[in-house]
Amino acid sequence: MTELKPVKEGKVREIYDNGDSLIMVATDRISCFDVILDNEVTKKGTVLTQMSKFWFDMTEDILPNHMISVDVNDMPEFFRQPKFTGNSMMCKKLEMLPIECIVRGYITGSGWESYKKNGTVCGIKLPEGLLESDKLPEPIYTPSTKAEIGDHDENISYEQSVAHLEKHFPGKGEEYAAKLRDYTIALYKKCADYALTRGIIIADTKFEFGLNENGDIVLGDEMLTPDSSRFWPADGYEPGHAQPSFDKQFARDWLKSNEGHNWKLPQDVVDKTIAIYLEGYEKLTGNKLA
Ligand SMILES: Nc1ncnc2c1ncn2[C@@H]1O[C@H](COP(=O)(O)OP(=O)(O)O)[C@@H](O)[C@H]1O
Ligand SMILES: [Mg+2]
């Protein structure tokens, strides 16, 4: 068996090159406040990968996605070992479009900070009198450009997204920008409506798209996981303040109230965090994790 090395190792995900496909592995690492903790959250990687799979399956009617398989038997022999089972996704390699497609259905985080100052989010004027965490009258598309490593992503207007794409793909800026916006809103609406029926609010999320060998736009990356989205429990949702983060609240709260933690959680906090990931998955999909 040939030992493979990831071509890219992120805080949480590892990416392997497999010729004309990629294998994306979600590990059990957890990061809080941008630091990788000294704990493994058992099954977290599987929950994230299976959640992406669930959403990719649900949205195939909107546009094609890059998923080929989550079955390690379809992958090179190296992946047929327990640490890759369930948490690995083989994907079509795409030429990624250099825009992070963010959609917000509720006002929170940096959007709320901006609105308090000047009534806008990423240059979009919003109605007066919104409270923190309020639902927006319509979801808004707020693209950003992917920053170089270590930098923060930069929010851009829709017009700037046209120019940015035009620079990389001459003659295609208008077309790609409009398609990214329309796909992003359509995906969000379908999935957020569904999630609400399962008791989960998707406050906002980010999609990434790429081009396949025919030049068609395909949905890539991860989809609607707690790492790319804000999920809130619908039960107890109340505008006027920040909502509890569905996935990392226990870990964050514990870190904040325990100085000198050295980025290591006690086992009971890890166990609660695992339970929350599993519960989120089961709530959303209606299935137990295999
Ligand atoms: N199908 C795909 N083909 C090629 N690259 C992809 C595909 N899907 C996602 N990517 C890219 O793979 C990378 C995943 O890395 P990730 O661990 O999320 O780190 P980061 O988002 O910080 O770059 C991103 O650069 C993403 O744009
Ligand atoms: Mg990423």
Image (cartoon, grey):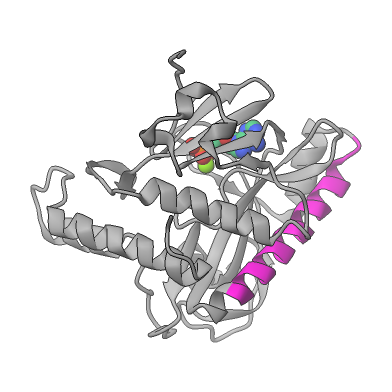
Which residue is farthest left?
Answer: 260
Instruction: Tell me the quadrant of ligand 1.
Output: top right
Q: Position of residue 36 (x, y in %)?
A: 29, 41
Question: Is residue 108 at all visible to an observer of this figure?
Answer: no
The answer to if 224 sits in the magenta stretch is no
Residue 96 found in image quarter: top right
Question: Is residue 2 at all visible to an observer of this figure?
Answer: yes
* Magenta residues, start to end: 171-194
Q: Position of residue 88 (x, y in %)?
A: 49, 38
75 over 154 or under it: above or below: above
Residue 13 found in image quarter: top left
Q: Most prominent secondary structure in the magenta stretch?
A: helix
Q: Quadrant of the N terminus?
A: top left
Residue 181 found in image quarter: bottom right
Q: Position of residue 23 (x, y in %)?
A: 55, 32
Q: Quadrant of the C terminus?
A: bottom left
Residue at screen point 32% across, 46% down = 31
80 over 239 or under it: above or below: above
The number of discs equals 0
Q: Nearer the viewer, residue 284 or 148?
A: 284
Which residue is farthest right?
Answer: 171
Which residue is farthest top?
Answer: 2
